[in-house]
Image (cartoon, rainbow, N blue to C red):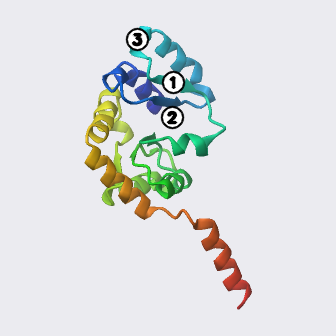
């Protein structure tokens, strides 16, 4: 999380290059103060489209308004964003069991639903370039969104209920 937080702090200097977008950094409590301090050091006109919060309590509403996610590649969150068809830039944590986040991210990348940056490649410049590459290309964004949606299971609760019923009826 520290590497992602540091990249986001550096990215803050570049977000004004995409004034048509609003950026929301959800830092987590441990990195909130440092991120806010780094961003508040910037001239105010360089951060008009940048918002920083430690946590979001209304994630469904935030995701409904989201065009692109930059995130770790945990399976639960990937399930949420693919159900909604949100393209992503995934930065798998190298510190998880069996490197499962990298496997998750590669699957979405291979299916055209995401781009992936390994943590060792992550910095403000590489992250901004990845964001710009998607958001400056509406047809690419749409293709990624469609690919993401195809991977998603928005009716997963109904599928689970039906499986339970099938098992109980055996």
Query: According to the image, label 3 marks what residue?
Result: 45
Q: Which residue is mark 1?
A: 51
Label 3–label 1 contact, CB within 8 A: no
Say which quarter of the image contains residue 20: top left
Q: Residue 106: name its quadrant.
A: bottom left
Residue 1: numbered disc? 2
Can the viewer see residue 2? no
In front of the other: 83 or 40: 83
The numbered mark, 3 or 2, whose residue comes first in the sequence reads: 2
User: On the picture, is 144 further left or further right than 159?
Assistant: left
- Give the crowd class for mark 3: few <14, some 14-19, many >=20 residues within 10 Å: few
Q: Earlier in the sequence, mark 3 or mark 1?
A: 3
Residue plotted at (30% across, 41% down)? 134
Considering every residue shown, the one lying at the far bottom of the view is 170
Distance, label 3 to label 2, CA atoms, is 27 Å
Residue 48 appears in the figure: yes
- Residue 12 in the image: state x and y as whole percent: 41, 21
Asked if labels 1 and 2 touch by Cβ distance under 8 angstroms, the answer is no
């Amino acid at each position: 999380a520290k590497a992602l937080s540091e990249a986001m702090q550096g990215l803050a200097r570049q977000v004004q290059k995409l004034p048509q977008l609003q950026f929301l950094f959800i830092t987590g409590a441990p990195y909130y103060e440092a991120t806010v301090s780094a961003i508040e050091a910037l001239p105010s006109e360089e951060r008009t489209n940048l918002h920083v919060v430690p946590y979001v309590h209304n994630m469904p509403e935030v995701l409904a308004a989201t065009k692109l996610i930059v995130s770790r590649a945990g399976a639960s969150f990937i399930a949420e964003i693919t159900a909604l068809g949100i393209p992503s830039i995934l930065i798998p944590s190298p510190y998880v069991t069996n490197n499962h986040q990298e496997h998750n991210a590669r699957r979405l990348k291979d299916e055209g639903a995401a781009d992936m940056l390994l943590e060792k490649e992550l910095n403000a410049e590489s992250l901004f370039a990845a964001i710009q590459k998607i958001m400056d290309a509406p047809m690419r964004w749409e293709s990624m969104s469609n690919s993401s949606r195809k991977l998603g299971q928005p009716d997963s609760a109904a599928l689970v209920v039906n499986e339970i019923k099938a098992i109980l009826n055996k």
